[in-house]
């Protein structure tokens, strides 16, 4: 943009300094190595000292030697004249991703998009079953509770269930928040409203059903997310095993999981 007078400064220079813990001695250690005493300006009680052999001080590498011992009541600091520190104000939009160090941006600065506040998960490795029923029942062990930190948070629910039932029979699954079914199909006559369903072609089949759902509970109270099932026909359904559970390598035992993540607004 236009300006009147001198061009505004975009960079500033300062020098590295060191303040000493003073005692009754003539020898001190410098923070930075120097070639000789002319590379530092030494001040004792705010009075600049004269460098050089036979004068106030000499310096080599990190060793500073005074011609006379200081008193414990003195104050002493030095300026490293060869160590200029330059601060530059970068031009707008001049910083690229390649110029940012890994892990340089903290979570507090990562604004404008959702951040994961907490992750909770449950894994069920044992088997269970359900017989024909007119109503849904909780799948034992397929539940996880979370307490959101803010009412504006969303909860991402991820679940995976390995299920099996008789050939040509229907098994329904649904996701529930506390006692409310969520992520289910629209109402349509007498049709069931479910989250997932299976109808296997063989009793040897085991079918994995998985789903993701971003929920908006608007609560800071503890919430239980769980998976329920219902065996619609006169049959038995199983979790984490095949329907025909012969003891051989073709009939695996499996694991099912449910995970919840709080996504901050």
Image (tube, rainbow, N blue to C red):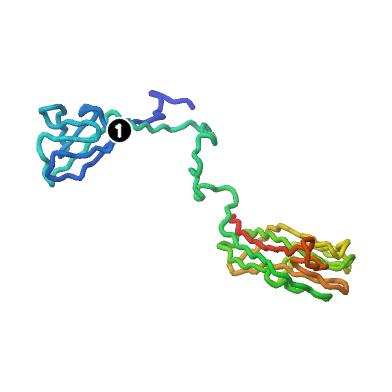
Quarter holding residue 260? bottom right
Is 256 situated left or right of 91 in this image? right
Q: Position of residue 112 (x, y in %)?
A: 57, 47
**Along the line of sight, the residue nearer the viewer: 37 or 79:** 37
- Compare residues 83 and 151 and report the one nearer the observer: 83
The mark total stands at 1
Residue 232 sits in which quadrant?
bottom right
Q: Quadrant of the C terminus?
A: bottom right
Q: Left of 133 or right of it: where is 212?
A: left
Residue shown at 14% from the left, 29% from the top: 50
Figure quadrant of residue 126: bottom right
Toward the viewer: 142 or 80? 142
Q: Position of residue 38 (x, y in %)?
A: 21, 27
Residue drawn 53% across the image and 34% down it = 98
Q: Residues within 10 Å of mark 1 (few under 14, many from 20)?
A: few
Residue at 41% across, 29% down: 10
Estimate the x, y position of residue 116 in percent, counting from the top left: 58, 55
Secondary structure at numbered mark 1:
strand
Which residue is at 73% across, 73% downward?
Answer: 138
Residue 144 placement (x, y as % from top left): 64, 67
| Residue 64 position (above or below residue 200) | above
Out of 107 and 257, give the one closest to the viewer. 257
Q: Is residue 79 above or below residue 105?
A: above
Q: Which residue is mark 1?
A: 15
């Amino acid at each position: 943009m236009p300006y009147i007078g001198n061009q505004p400064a975009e960079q500033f220079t300062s020098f590295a300094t060191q303040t000493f813990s003073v005692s009754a001695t003539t020898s001190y250690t410098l923070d930075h190595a120097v070639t000789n005493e002319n590379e530092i300006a030494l001040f004792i009680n705010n009075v600049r000292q004269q460098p050089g052999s036979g004068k106030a001080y000499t310096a080599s590498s990190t060793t500073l030697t005074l011609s006379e011992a200081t008193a414990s009541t003195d104050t002493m600091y030095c300026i490293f004249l060869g160590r200029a520190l330059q601060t530059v104000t970068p031009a707008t939009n001049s910083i690229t991703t390649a110029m940012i160090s890994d892990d340089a941006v903290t979570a507090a600065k990562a604004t404008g998009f959702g951040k994961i506040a907490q992750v909770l998960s449950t894994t069920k490795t044992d088997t269970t079953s359900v017989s024909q029923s007119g109503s849904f029942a909780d799948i034992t062990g397929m539940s996880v509770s979370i307490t959101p930190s803010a009412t504006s948070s969303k909860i991402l629910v991820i679940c995976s269930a390995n299920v099996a039932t008789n050939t040509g029979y229907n098994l329904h699954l649904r996701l529930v928040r506390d006692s409310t079914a969520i992520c289910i199909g629209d109402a349509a006559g007498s049709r069931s409203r479910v989250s997932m369903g299976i109808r296997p072609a063989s009793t040897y089949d085991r079918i994995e059903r998985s789903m993701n759902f971003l929920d908006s509970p608007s609560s800071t109270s503890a919430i239980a997310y769980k998976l329920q099932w219902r065996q619609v026909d006169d049959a038995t359904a199983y979790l984490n095993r095949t329907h025909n559970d012969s003891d051989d390598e073709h009939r695996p035992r499996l694991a099912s999981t449910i995970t919840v993540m709080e996504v901050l607004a």
